Amino acid sequence: MSDTLNDPQAPIFEDEPSAEGSPEAVPRIERELLGEPTLEVRNLHRFFGKLKAVNNVSFKAYAGQVMGFIGPNGAGKTTTMRILSTLETPTAGDAFICGQSVIDYPDRVRHRLGFMPDAFGKYPNMNVVEYLDFFARAYGFKGDKRRDAVEHVLVFTELRKLADKPIDTLSKGMSQRLGLGRTLIHDPQVLILDEPAAGLDPRARVELRELIHLLATELQKTVLISSHILTELGEICDSAVIIEAGQIVASGTIKELLSLRRQVAGRQSHATIEVSLIDRVVDVERWLVQQAFVSDVATSPHAVTFEFSGDQQAQHQLLKSMIAEGFPILEFRGKVESLEDAFMELTKGITQ
Amino acid sequence: MNDLTARWNERLERWSDRLNPLVVREVRQALKTRTFLLVFLLLLLLTWVGSSIGVIATSQQAHAVELGPQFFAWYLIALLICLLFATPAGAFFSMSHEFRDRAFEVLAISTLSPRKIINGKLNGAFVMTLVYASVLSPYLCLSYLLGGISLAMLALTMAWLLLASYTMTLFAIMLGSLATKPWIEVVNLVILLAASTITSAISYGVLGELGFRGGGVVEMAFALGCFLVFILFAALISYGVAQSQLTPTFIPLTYRRQVVARKVEPSPSNGAAALPAGPEVPAESRGPHE
């Protein structure tokens, strides 16, 4: 067992069943396409007395994947992230980072994981380079390796020009960059970012988004990111897990979540269409409800929105008919469904 | 000159790799604080001015009376202030600051163990103690040269003070690690100041009685031995409390075994596919981890 402890690549458990024979084995096709999951949460529970903060949560993420972790306040996001970061122990269940259990091998997990909490203290009387240097030392880097690690992070986060600036004088955006840099200093495979965009101005948000995109695409990191800004998460993430009252409501790719949203709403439509008009909104509404493939017609002072379940040809035919009817159309466009729409449809607003 | 400085810095950098990362950070931070600069300059100025005035005022009787103990009594007060008030207070604020804005969380998930964190804070503070003591070393030599105080007595006194400072710093780190809320921080600071005052009073009383008013080296060594026993006890308790406070997850081995047994539970593979949460885990398999 002692050899196992010293070898990070060693099997986690001596009596671990083989993947093929295990009931929890990943289907072969999934494994061939995506590889082994770098982050896996398995039947995770965390109770605080009677409060079920995390109640049977399971999901997986793979290298190069940016996964959104979405939920209202008190849904259990931060608790799950803290368990994944080895800051808290689960009541039951387990979580794995690059195959290492957070319960059994927290030290190994810490080498493979970078956690950026929503707020992290800034030490006084310390500049940017000293801060990064300290964490490089804390992760065991010495000599040239330490200097290289710090330099690499300074370049990646574009903090080189602020290297000598005291960290308690940095703006919120720059502080978040520094936090991300600190998270990356030991080159972890999995990154857990808790509300990284909170309080950032639009420019800083865009820059942070680009950094996260680079991390996943070029460096093949697995990123689990929680945020309340769902429109933005929809742009960064390729998949998401929606959690409410400690339980997973839905999980999957963004496309799958939007499709699930339509199923939950009882609609088979493929598009939400918005028509902007100069006037005659009521006439258009009355006309639309009589048309094929049209449902859920809603109006606003100068626009009509409806669900359309027909194909593109049918959509084209509908527009032609509207013009033929002489309606004063300014714009006819498909409304893009967002992660926010999916979130609102799939969650019930339950708080614990 | 620039080359020399660069080479010296390079050498220091390499040497610092052998140190606990927290010692490097604490010393870097402490040397930049106004408090350190103020205490350092005040100490330097007061001992210099005080010694000059003392030497001038007693110059007439210097050949007749041994003035060493009188001078040393003043230096002892300066040492007590630096070693038993300034250094522990610095360590206390350094530790309590870790709990502001969740700073400790990012430290806890690094590869630094709670023991390394405490040792780093303690040794960082000890470096400051040595800096303060080095300021006073020329004056300690002066008190020896003025007669009436032996080298052994000076060494035992310094050993006493360094031990007291080390333990008070450890006590301060423990109090700092318990200061997870602002009001607790205030209460703990008051406790620390009270403890520093009591330790200073005891130290001054014992050292003054034994060292400067006729006590011998043997009595002094006995007092130091008794003090050492008390110090060890206090230090062990402080260390244990601080370490448990800084341990984010404490999982007894027996529970690890339970977790191993649970590995074979079936789990839904709902990673990439869109589906709701997996089935509820049977109640009997939901054994607590802690």
Image: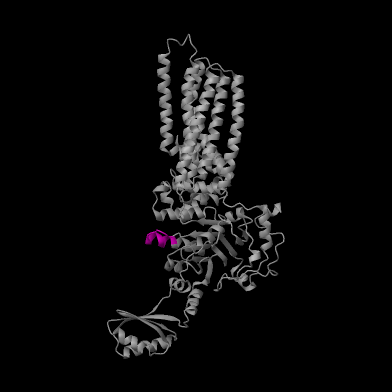
The total of numbered circles placed on residues is 0
- The magenta-colored residue range is A197-208
Residue drawn at x 48%, y 34% as measured from the top left: B194
Give residue A25's quadrant in the image: bottom right
Q: Is residue B17 above or below residue A2?
A: above
Residue drawn at x 50%, y 31% as measured from the top left: B198
> Looking at the image, can residue A97 be seen?
no
Q: Residue furthest front?
A: A50
Left or right: A43, with A284 as reference point: right
Residue A109 location (% of width, % of height): 59, 56
Residue A110 location (% of width, % of height): 58, 54
Q: Is residue B68 above or below residue B201?
A: above
Residue drawn at x 43%, y 24% as measured from the top left: B47
Left or right: B199, with A21 as reference point: left
Q: Is residue B35 above or below residue A29?
A: above
- Which image quarter is the N terminus of chain A in? bottom right
**Is A266 included in the stretch rendered in magenta?**
no
Residue B32 location (% of width, % of height): 43, 39
> Looking at the image, can residue A237 be seen?
yes
Q: Nearer the viewer, residue A151 or B112?
A: B112
Q: Residue furthest left?
A: A279
Residue B231 location (% of width, % of height): 58, 33
Q: Is residue B241 above or below residue A171?
A: above
Q: Nearer the viewer, residue A246 or A318?
A: A246
Q: How is the image coloured?
A: one colour
Residue drawn at x 51%, y 75% as measured from the top left: A256
